[in-house]
Image (cartoon, rainbow, N blue to C red):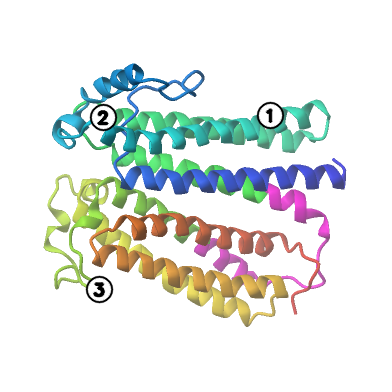
Amino acid sequence: MTRQDRRQVGIWLFICCALVYAMLALGGVTRLTGSGLSMVEWQPLIGVLPPMDQAAWQELFAKYQLTPEFRHVNHDMDLEGFKGIFWLEYFHRLLGRSVGVVFFVPFAWFYLKRKLDRPTLIRLGAIFFVGSMQGVMGWLMVKSGLINDPHVSPYRLTAHLALAFIVYGWMFWTALELVVGGEGLPTGRPPGWLKSFSWVVLVLISITVISGGFVAGAKAGYGYNTFPTMHGQWFPDAYWDLQPAWLNLFENPVAIQWDHRLLATITFFSVLAYGLLGRRAGAPRRIHVMYQHIMFAVLLQVALGIATLMLHVPIGLAWAHQVWSMMLFTYALYIHYYMQTGQSRESWS
């Protein structure tokens, strides 16, 4: 690949990353407003057009009225109320299709124009496959709430979220390699301990995000709305209520919330230490600035999380908490790239 080819492909991947970020943001709105189960059919190829007349709306509403969510949660909803939740889920799915088109069409063009070397071609093909599986998992998640329980499976919701982060992170890293990779190596390298710390921070943020998926899926944020203790307890008595014991980690809302608090606290102090120590390690200016950004990002993320909990999960704060998690992940991934590759026009002192 020529330098121009690398730059073109990299910029295209950054655009795809922005769209995946938008998908996460819109997905958060659909989840928090209870809109995700409004579309009871999956038509990935032909389900692009919305209802065009009153008869079509009535038909869709009749199908929704057969779902557990309507029978147990929204039994007093009328057609106008159904339209309100339908449009959010419709645009979420439409954006998902758009991401697929924006990825696949340029991918095919770059391939036909022989602008992709073999390693990049294989990696992009793998990203497309995982992205497709993320879409399938999204439908499996929705389907889990259409059978008996009017709530989606926390396992599938978390898997859907995790796959979105994997696709986003993989594309972002690949774009950095293509756009930044040709800058050359600096005269100095980051300390080995800081490179290891970079791994720790990235893993902690990722695990905390996954934990947050279980919090959302189990609606664990709606109980124990005090901080720093949980109704006066540092370790809640109800943590081990389920048997076998391991089930509490994934299905007991009390345990899920406590685990997320613990992980968030560890991540918070780790990121602050990472930023402070990195700034004192002679980082190039661009990384020095990014350490400032990641410390601000983790402060804001924790503040959003605490406020969301203590105010009983208002939609706006809960949405911002979810969306900002990917920004924190982005900062960590960006710094981690430079930690591991050392590619920069500037030097480590």
In this rendering, the answer to whether 218 lies above or below 190 is above
- Tell which tag, 2 or 3, sits nearer the viewer: 2
Mark 1: few, some, or many residues within 10 Å (few <14, many ≥20)? few
Query: Is any part of residue 18 visible from this angle?
Result: yes
The amino acid type of the residue labelled 2 equals Leu
Identity of the residue drawn at 45% across and 61% down: 204
**What is the secondary structure assignment of the residue under circle 3?**
loop
Instruction: Tell me where residue 128 appears, x and y as whole percent.
Output: 60, 32
Taking depth in this image into account, of 224 and 249 the one nearest to the observer is 224
Identity of the residue drawn at 15% across and 33% down: 75
The amino acid type of the residue labelled 3 equals Pro
Q: Earlier in the sequence, mark 2 or mark 3?
A: 2
The amino acid type of the residue labelled 1 equals Val
Q: Earlier in the sequence, mark 2 or mark 1?
A: 2
Q: Which residue is mark 2?
A: 79
* Highlighted range, magenta: 174-201
Taking depth in this image into account, of 322 and 82 the one nearest to the observer is 82
**What is the secondary structure assignment of the residue under circle 2?**
helix
Identity of the residue drawn at 57% across and 33% down: 98
**What is the secondary structure assignment of the residue under circle 1?**
helix
In which quadrant of the rendered view does residue 191 lie? bottom right
The prevailing secondary structure element of the residues shown in magenta is: helix
Measure how far apart labels 3 and 1 are at the Cα level: 49 Å
Q: Which residue is mark 1?
A: 105
Instruction: Tell me where residue 167 appears, x and y as whole percent.
Output: 55, 42
Q: Is residue 248 left or right of residue 208?
A: left
Residue 177 magenta-highlighted: yes
In which quadrant of the rendered view does residue 90 lie? top left
Q: Which residue is mark 3?
A: 228
Mark 3: few, some, or many residues within 10 Å (few <14, many ≥20)? few
